[in-house]
Amino acid sequence: MALTTLLLILAGLLTASLGQLLREQPGFAVDNVLLAGVDLPPQSYSQPDVRLHFYERVLAGVQSLPGVRAAGWVSLPPLGGQGSVTGITLPGESRGAETPIANYRPASPDYFSAMGIRLIEGRIFGPADLNRKVAVVSQSVAERFWPGKSAVSQICVTQWGPDVPAEVVGVVGDIHTVGIDEPPVMMVYVPHWFNTFSIPSFATFVLRTATDPAASADAVRQLVHTIDADVPITSLHPMTEIVSQSVDDRRFPMFLAISFAVFSLVLASLGIFGVVGYSVEQRRRELGIRMALGADLKRLTRMVLRQGLIPVVLGLVTGVVAAVFAGRLISSLLFGVSAHDPATFLIVVLVVAVVATVASYIPARRAMRVDPIVALRYE
């Protein structure tokens, strides 16, 4: 019972943690979003304008597909990890060890609506900004450099390549970049004309669809291959699948703990059932004499239950104490849940208590139905 209680509490903590993780707001749309990654061969796409022409052709094609509401491209999508990481400062500040670090993302203007990234302030850069040094920053950048003030029309010095002063034209919400369980990082989004790095040789097309995004996967694959059959599609997945894969490292230990806990609970229940049943069988003559002398059946049932549940109570207490210490060992696997979550402890104690009581009550109740005369003659 102690081991069962310990395993159930650990499984409960991991389950609650995964639930909190899946309820976490990632900062972008998850449903009805399809991501298609491409990697341009360097032999054919060594020039930035050639790469941009390919992206524009694909983007025009996917925007015309049935059921596609919005489409855009970005160098690295949400949950794609960090990339193009370098410093960002204010005018007049020099580089140093304490220079804030941001992730730079070249993106098309329609990327934000397609990805469902919320515009908080200002606007998204567009064709009217052509050849201007403009940028859209995430909320964490705005709060870091201009706390309590509007970030729109402010100047930041981007250090992605040569130091370039850029005007902030908009602020968007933070997104989870590394993983759902990792805090958002500072992001700077730039248009394709920003510098020589802003038309990358790899990109991800984002499609917001009206129906199941997987239904558009074949059409996207055919479109890319029609434009250039030599361009490989490195990934083609709905956003829901990508989010699900991002928590796989947490899902496996949860399922493992649940499996062991349920198996242990079944074994413990069978053990209680067998022990109480054997104890009742050994005391059949005693119980028969008690009933023949007019003993109250409810009192006899409570007596048998009490004897069967004393080890259960001791096991519960031991298991809870062990779980308090064991919770510290899995604290790194928990998200949004304390290792000593009282709700989880209470639920497990109630479940174990109910199961143990039922396992003890069944043989006790069966013994109380035996005719006292039959029990005495049996002996």
Image (cartoon, rainbow, N blue to C red):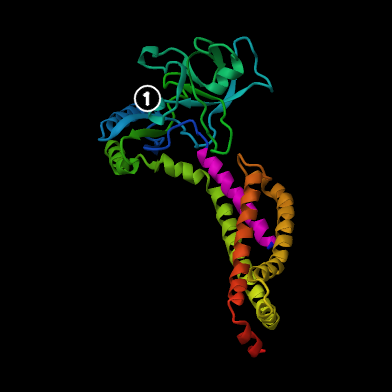
Q: Residue at x 54, y 44 (%)?
A: 19
Judging depth in this view, the residue of 309 and 85 nearest the camera is: 309
Outermost residue toward the front in this view: 294
> On the image, numbered disc 1 is attached to which residue?
110
Task: Where is residue 328? Give x, y as percent.
Answer: 71, 47
Q: Is residue 73 left or right of residue 188?
A: left
Question: In the rendered view of the protein, which quadrant contains the C terminus?
Answer: bottom right
Q: Magenta span covers which residues?
A: 2-23
Q: Residue at x 41, y 13 (%)?
A: 131
Residue type, mark 1 in image: Asp
Task: Where is residue 7? Give x, y as percent.
Answer: 64, 57
Q: Is residue 233 left or right of residue 320?
A: left
Judging depth in this view, the residue of 364 and 130 nearest the camera is: 364
Residue 287, quarter of picture? bottom right
Task: Where is residue 100? Give x, y as percent.
Answer: 63, 22
Q: Is residue 71 above or below residue 240?
A: above
Magenta stretch holds residue 13 = yes
The 10 Å Cα crowd at callout 1, few under 14, some 14 to 19, many 20 or more, is some
Q: Is residue 163 visible?
A: no
Q: Is residue 64 left or right of residue 265?
A: left
Task: Where is residue 71? Give x, y as percent.
Answer: 34, 30
Judging depth in this view, the residue of 47 and 80 nearest the camera is: 80
Magenta stretch holds residue 315 = no
Question: In the rendered view of the protein, which quadrant contains the N terminus?
Answer: bottom right
Q: Is residue 231 visible?
A: yes
Q: Is residue 170 above or below residue 17?
A: above
Label 1: state its secondary structure: loop
Q: Main secondary structure of the magenta part?
A: helix
Judging depth in this view, the residue of 151 and 191 nearest the camera is: 151
